[in-house]
């Protein structure tokens, strides 16, 4: 049945459009459909139906008259229009229209004989085709087009769009040009709609690229760009030079004396820093935070390994004023995720330092958050408060993270480790990643929440392990977005059921710090193909090697046949492809899956696998010679 909407609501022909010669057409021509939406003419040698046929020319003339109102018998003209359209449709074959692959078709779209064309969209432009030269096809909608409807759960359209968001954009990013994993649902649905409107309706709240550009002209820049970039340019034009100017001790002393004269009742404060060469206070606080709290915890009541520099200095000032004559300055705040200043800091690290290095002298992408925040605090009209003293890192510094599912035993196991400040939570900094937003507890800087990646179904790899590469492609993307990896010597991905000892890890890794390497930690089958391997229970990657991955991951996704691999094999093959070296250290981990586990091994720095809290803390107690009691209320 041919559905014909009312003429008033859906104009079928634009009389202002130049007339088309009969029997000719343009490859980029747009053919009006009966639902009022322009469709694409893709390939083929036949002219587009309806308007390019002889009968279509008659229909076009009738449409022109009906639309413009010049016909004396408007009603009769409308009837003749319908008859002409129906006749034209019956005499020509329907136009070939590309259709997007469904969730179960996407994985085989590149196979021989497949008639499902993968798509990639950038605004109103679509790239269609695999195995042939892609054609750019312009698709546009009339303002009075069909009513919008965002796909609802349970519908075929919703399933296709969901697959594109969670899998397609990562497995085949070339199909979705202009979109990212952060693009909204409507943008992905718009891609499906523009290729085949019978599969998905036009989504609501969708703004095309051209409309978005027009709105962006009137929309003010984001504050973190406006304040960090525009304000700097304004001051630069005034002839000011932005530099990190360090005050001399004489200048500091003079300012303190003047402040003391103005406000003699105000108690002086000074937070010790490593720049105070003759300040014994920094040395005392450093020892207390790294060694004293571990060796003599009774000396530091109400303090623990997560306590801040200021709290340790305040304690030493109260108990031994000869070591720390001044109390620390406590009017400070280090930015947290979600705060406006946090956006400023990330923009500076990811973009500002590269675009305008003269604005950030002394800073690099490896600079700590506190260093960048202190720099931004100097700006006029800044939203960044004075940061607190940065936490002290070990040497080499370790950034650790775990990936786990939001259901099952893993969330409880991670919460138990957090309460004890063990596992990845004993590294210099850490992150937790899951397929849902979860609160695990309190950490050294406040609430510990998961970074969220899409839920992804996994199969069985060629080695009879989980084919979970796509999950970790998502996870590594979140590690980049977080960006804290950039100021650590090593990044370690640790399975939730692995016990780790950071002090031993540093011994194993210190000789390779600064090199472009990763660690292969298991040689279960010497001489066999793919052995030795980097087992996924503990993946140790140096900063240089991880930067190589972050910059070259697209090359790996495009050139490696990773779909049936486990994520540890994929990461190792990817790092090899990108020119990274590896070191063999089979003693860094005692792994039940490799050659067996022995928690009494005093040289091993990690132990795997202990899936229950009781088993995990029993091994932890053996390693540290402490009570293995599981923390309560987890």
Image (cartoon, rainbow, N blue to C red):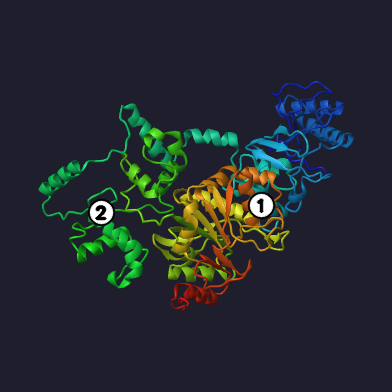
- Dividing the picture into quadrants, the one containing residue 287 is bottom left
- Residue 427 image offset from top left, x and y in percent: 45, 60
Q: Within 10 angstroms of label 2, few (less than 14), some, or many (20 or more) residues?
A: some
- Residue 224 image offset from top left, x and y in percent: 41, 42
Image position of 25 (left or right of 423): right
Q: Which residue is mark 2?
A: 271
- Residue 580 image offset from top left, x and y in percent: 58, 46
Would you place residue 239 above or below residue 308 in this image? above
- Dividing the picture into quadrants, the one containing residue 608 is bottom right
Residue at 71% x, 59% y: name it.
461
Q: Which residue is mark 1?
A: 167
Q: How many marks?
A: 2
Residue nearest the observer in this picture, 37 or 169: 169
Would you place residue 350 above or below residue 446 in this image? above
The tag on residue 572 is none
Task: State how far apart marks 1 and 2 are (Cα).
Answer: 49 Å
Would you place residue 21 above or below residue 316 in this image? above
Image position of 567 (left or right of 31): left
Residue at 70% x, 58% y: name it.
527
Q: Is residue 432 visible?
A: no
Q: Is residue 618 visible?
A: yes
Q: Within 10 angstroms of label 1, few (less than 14), some, or many (20 or more) residues?
A: many
Residue nearest the observer in this picture, 205 or 370: 370
Residue at 32% x, 67% y: name it.
303
């Amino acid at each position: 049945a041919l559905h014909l909407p009312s003429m008033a609501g859906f104009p079928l022909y634009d009389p202002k459009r130049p007339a088309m010669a009969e029997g000719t057409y343009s490859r980029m021509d747009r053919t009006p459909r009966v639902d009022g939406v322009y469709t694409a003419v893709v390939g083929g040698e036949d002219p587009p139906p309806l308007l390019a046929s002889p009968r279509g020319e008659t229909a076009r003339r009738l449409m022109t008259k009906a639309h413009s109102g010049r016909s004396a018998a408007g009603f009769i003209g409308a009837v003749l229009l319908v008859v002409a359209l129906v006749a034209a449709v019956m005499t020509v074959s329907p136009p070939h229209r590309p259709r997007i692959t469904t969730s179960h078709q996407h994985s085989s779209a590149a196979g021989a004989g497949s008639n499902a064309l993968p798509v990639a969209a950038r605004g109103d432009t679509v790239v269609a085709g695999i195995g042939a030269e892609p054609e750019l096809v312009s698709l546009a909608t009339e303002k009075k087009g069909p009513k919008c409807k965002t796909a609802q759960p349970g519908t075929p359209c919703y399933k296709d769009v969901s697959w594109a968001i969670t899998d397609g954009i990562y497995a085949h990013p070339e199909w979705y040009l202009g979109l990212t994993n952060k693009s909204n649902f409507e943008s992905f649905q718009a891609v499906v709609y523009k290729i085949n409107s019978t599969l998905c309706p036009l989504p609501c709240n969708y703004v095309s690229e051209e409309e978005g550009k027009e709105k962006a002209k009137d929309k003010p820049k984001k504050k973190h760009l406006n304040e960090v970039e525009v304000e700097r340019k304004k001051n630069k034009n005034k002839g000011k030079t932005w530099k990190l100017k360090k005050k001399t001790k004489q200048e500091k002393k003079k300012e303190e004396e003047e402040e003391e004269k103005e406000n003699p009742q105000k108690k002086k404060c000074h937070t010790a820093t490593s720049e105070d060469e003759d300040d014994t206070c920094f040395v005392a606080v450093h020892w207390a935070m790294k060694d004293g709290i571990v060796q003599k915890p009774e000396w530091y009541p109400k303090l623990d390994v997560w306590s801040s520099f200021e709290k340790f200095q305040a304690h030493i000032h109260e108990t031994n004023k000869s070591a720390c004559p001044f109390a620390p300055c406590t009017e400070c705040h280090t930015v947290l995720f979600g705060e406006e200043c946090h956006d400023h800091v990330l923009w500076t690290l990811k973009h500002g330092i590269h675009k305008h290095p003269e604005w950030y002298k002394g800073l690099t992408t490896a600079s700590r958050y506190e260093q960048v925040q202190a720099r931004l605090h100097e700006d006029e009209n800044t939203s960044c408060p004075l940061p607190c003293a940065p936490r002290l890192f070990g040497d080499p510094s370790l950034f650790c993270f775990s990936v786990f599912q939001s259901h099952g035993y893993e969330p409880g196991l991670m919460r138990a480790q957090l309460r004890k400040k063990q596992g990845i939570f004993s590294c210099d900094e850490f992150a937790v990643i899951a397929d849902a937003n979860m609160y695990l507890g309190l950490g050294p800087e406040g609430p510990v929440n998961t970074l969220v990646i899409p839920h992804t179904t996994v199969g069985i790899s060629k080695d009879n392990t989980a084919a979970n590469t796509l999950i970790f492609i998502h996870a590594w993307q979140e590690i980049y977005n977080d960006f804290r990896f950039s100021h650590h010597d090593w990044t370690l991905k640790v399975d939730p059921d692995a016990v780790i000892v950071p002090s031993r890890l540093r011994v194993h890794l210190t000789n390779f710090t600064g090199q472009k390497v990763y660690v292969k930690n298991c040689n279960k089958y010497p001489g066999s193909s793919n052995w030795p391997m980097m087992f996924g229970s503990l993946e140790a990657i140096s900063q240089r090697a991880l930067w190589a991955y972050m910059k070259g991951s697209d090359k790996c996704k495009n050139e490696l046949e990773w779909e049936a691999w486990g994520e540890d094999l994929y990461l190792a093959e990817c790092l090899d492809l990108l020119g990274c070296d590896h070191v063999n250290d089979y003693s860094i981990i005692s792994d039940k899956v490799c050659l067996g586990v022995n928690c009494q091994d005093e040289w091993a720095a990690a132990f795997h696998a202990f899936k229950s809290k009781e088993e995990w803390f029993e091994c932890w107690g053996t390693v540290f010679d402490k009570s293995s009691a599981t923390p309560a209320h987890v």
